[in-house]
Image: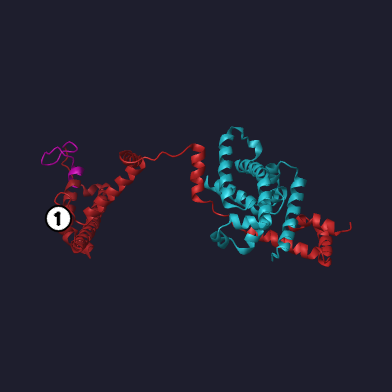
Amino acid sequence: MRRHTRRIFNICYRFTGNRTEAEDLSQDVFLRVYRTLGSYRSAHGGFATWATSVTRNLLIDHYRRTKRDRITDSLDDKMPVVENKESAGRRPDEQALLGELSVQVQSALTRLSPELREAVILRDLQQLEYAEIQTVLAVPEGTVKSRINRGRIELARILQQMGVRPA
Amino acid sequence: MTWTCDLIEARLSDYLEGLLQGPERAAFEAHANSCADCSPLVASVRGLVGEMHAMEELEAPPRLVYAILDKTLGPRETVTGWQAFLNVIRGLATPKFAYGAASVMATLIIILGASGFSLRKPKLADLRPAAIYQSADRQVHLVFARSVKYVSDLRVVYEIQSRLRQDENNLQTAPEEMLPKTSPGKNPGQTDEHKPSQPRQQNRANEITRQLEMMAAELPMLSERSGR
C-alpha cells in the first residue's frame, strides 16, 4: 500500500509540480482504483501498470480541467506558468530537500506538453520499460519512443533557456 | 546513409540507450562530434537523462495513506474508554502471546531456581547479588563433584563387568581335569555331599565369589586411582 502510494504520489507530483495537487490527485487515483477494481484484468499487465494507467488518465483529465484556470492565472500575474508553479506549489523546506538542479528539472517538466511530459516521467523518473509505457499510454511502441526522445530534447532546450546546463 | 542533424536528433535516445550498434553508432558519433549544433545537444541530453535517473523519489506524506484509507474504506471508528481497554486485552489473548509469556515464565523459574531463590519461602536476602553468586558457585561445585563421582563409579563398574566376563570365558574353556571329580557309581551332577547342584555350576559360583571378594578388597585402591 505504502509502496504504491509513494509511486503514484511521485507520478502526480512530477506531472503537476505541486505537492497539494499531487496529494489530492493521489487520493482520487486510489478511490478510482478501489471502485474499478472489478474491471482489472491481468491482460492490462501487472497491478502496478494498471494503477499507473488510472493515474495517467486522471492526470490528463485534471490537466484539461485546469487548463483554462492556468491561462487566466498566468495572464493575471503576467508571469510565465513555470514561475507561478514554483512559487505557489513548493515550500522552502521542499526547495532545500530537492537538489537545485532537480528543482530546475522539475520546473522545466511542467513546461513540457502533457504528452511528452508523461512519457519522460514514466521512462526517466519512474524508469518503466518501453512495453509498460506502451500499455499505460495505449499507443504503439514507435510513438512511445518518439515521445520520449522529443520530450528529452525539448526538456534540455527549456533548461538551456533557463540558463541551466546539466553536466 | 548520410547522418543529418535531424536524423541525429531523431535517433538520439536510441544512441543514449545503446540501441545503435556497429557502423550506425560510429556514423552517429562521427557526425555528433564534428557538428557544432549536435555536439552540445547530445551532451546536454545525456547530462539531463543522467540527472533524471539520479533524482530520488519523494516520500509521500504519512497523512496521505490515512486519507486514502478514509476515502476508500470509510473513516476509522475511534474507540475510547473500556472498549479500547478490552481491545488491547483481546489483542493480547492470542496463542502467540501466550506461548511467549509461558516461555518467559519458564526461563525466569529456571534462573531463580539456579540462583537458590526459594519460591515456597521467598526471602529478600536471597536476591542479594552476593547470595546469588554464592549459591550459583555452590551449585556449580556440587554438579562438578557429582559428575566426578559418577565417572569414577562408572569406571569401577566397567572394570568389574569386564573381569566377570573374562572369568566366564575362562570357565567355559577350562579343561575337564580342572573340574572336581565325582565318585564313580554316582549319578552325573551329584556331589559327594549329595547336593543336587551340578558340579560345573557350583565350581563357577565358587570362582565368582572368590573373584568378587578379591575385587572388593581392591575397590578402595581402584577408587583412589580413579579419583586422581
Seen as rendered, the residue at the extreme left is B193
Q: On screen, A35 above or below B28?
A: above
Question: Most prominent secondary structure in the magenta stretch?
Answer: loop
Q: Residue at x 19, y 49 (%)?
A: B208
Q: Is residue A84 magenta?
A: no
Disc 1 crowd rating (10 Å Cα; few below 14, some 14-19, many 20+) is few
The colour applied to the residues of chain A in this rendering is: cyan
Q: Is residue B67 left or right of residue B19?
A: left
Q: On screen, B130 above or below B192?
A: below
The quadrant of the picture occupied by the C terminus of chain B is bottom left
Q: Is residue B107 left or right of residue A57?
A: left
Of residues B169 and B225, the one nearer the viewer is: B225
The quadrant of the picture occupied by the N terminus of chain B is bottom right
Of residues B183 and B119, the one nearer the viewer is: B119
Can residue B217 be seen at all in this image of the molecule?
no
Q: Is residue B198 magenta?
A: yes
Q: Position of residue B134 (x, y in %)?
A: 19, 63
Tell which subunit mark 1 falls on. Answer: B
Can residue A125 be seen at all in this image of the molecule?
yes
Range of magenta residues: B186-203
Q: Residue at x 84, y 56 (%)?
A: B7
Q: On screen, A77 above or below A38?
A: below
Quarter of the rendering containing residue B139: bottom left
Q: Helix, strand, or loop for circle 1?
A: loop
Task: Name the residue beneath numbered marker 1.
Answer: B123
Of residues B213 and B111, the one nearer the viewer is: B111
> Among the chains, which one is red?
B
Q: Position of residue B25 (x, y in %)?
A: 81, 59
Q: Position of residue B38 (x, y in %)?
A: 81, 63
